[in-house]
Image: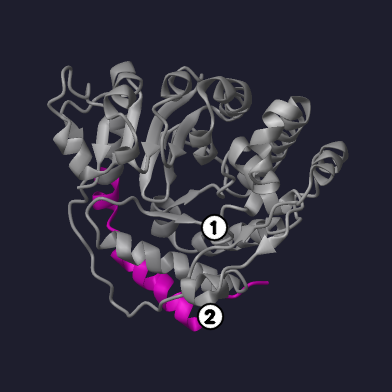
Amino acid sequence: MFQPSPKTISMLEDIERRIDPEVEEDFSAQWRRFLYGEFDGDVFAPRRKRLSEPGIQYPKIYINDAIEDYDLMLQSELATLSHVLNNFSRTLGVWVGGYGTGLLSSVLGAEIFVVPRDLNTPPTTRTLGNTERLREMVERGIPDLENGFGKRTFECGEIFADVFSKYPKIAKYVNVYHPDLQGPLDIAELLWGGDMFYAMYDEPELVHGVLSLITETFTAFLRRWQKIFPCTSDINCYKFYHYRGTILLRCDSAMNLSPELYREYAVPYDTRLYERFGGGAMHFCGKGDHYIEMLSQVPGLTGVNLAQPEYNDMETIYRHTVDKGIKILMLNRNQALNDKDRAGGYHHCMSTWA
């Protein structure tokens, strides 16, 4: 039976003391108004009414230590909550996410690669190395979900759920985001490496087989996670911001695809997941203006978070997001303010940091 250390208990007590229900209810209501079209301004920037400074000193936790120790993982996320309570625009959320972007690829059999400790960067995975291993993976079907970092993720989630249940305000106001399972295309590239792009031309059936297996494994993993943290709300949280729907997918790898390849190898699998889990949002890094029109047509998509607007023709992005009622989630503040006088404006669908 897990027992938090005295240091962790002192952090939990500090967070519980500092959570102000009035502040958090108001903050959540701001997001709900924005996400459901009741915001009537140009640019939505959520703002917490009052800040709360820590009453104790919070330690710096290295991610390499946290992934080996559930107590330190809990401390790491509590330190994040402490920062959020003293920040105007971020959502109270924790993430059993220290296991990195390679969580699902590790479950599917990829070797875990741990980054040197002093870089304080989550781990990832190495590629499987050759096409035959991918073929064998597809033939085996959905793997044991406790492979790789799977077991630790579920165990850590159960610990968070049990510990938080003992602190009423934490249990009510702290959002727990689902593990970072990326999206089918991103996980396929982690498993395959750059050869995946050649295989889209040379072995399309195998690529579809890999993507289908990833989608089914994603589904099984998230359904098991939801037994620990049932998804009972129509609005959910990715750590620092809210979105409508249940899941946040990522599709960074799509920057490398033509629109035609994106339509064939990304859209069907993202659509399948949004349909199964009640819709959600999409994150992408890099360039996405070449496929944003197709993304905007994916059923269940409610919002888009893009990390690097400087790599995109933003007018193209706006035409296929805010002009269609799809929210842009927490865009770079300077970009959002600089473009707000564009023809037609943002239709009350733009959000940024306060």
Residue 163 shown left or right of residue 31 in the figure: right
Q: Quadrant of residue 60?
A: bottom left
As for residue 300 lying within the magenta part, the answer is no
Image x and y of residue 55, in percent: 28, 76
Q: Circle 2 is placed at which residue position?
A: 5
Q: Is residue 313 above or below residue 114?
A: above
Residue at 62% from the left image edge and 50% from the top image edge: 228
Quick one: label 2 or label 1, which is nearer the N terminus?
A: 2
| Predominant secondary structure, magenta span | helix
Residue at 54% from the left image edge and 47% from the top image edge: 178
How far separated are the C-alphas under marks 2 and 1? 18 Å
Q: Amino acid at mark 1?
A: Val
Q: Which of these two is toward me, 289 or 51?
A: 289
Image x and y of residue 293, in percent: 42, 19
Extent of the magenta region:
1-26
Q: Circle 1 is placed at which residue position?
A: 96
Q: Amino acid at mark 2?
A: Ser
Residue at 29% from the left image edge and 50% from the top image edge: 24
- What is the secondary structure assignment of the residue under circle 1? loop
**What is the number of the mark on residue 345?**
none
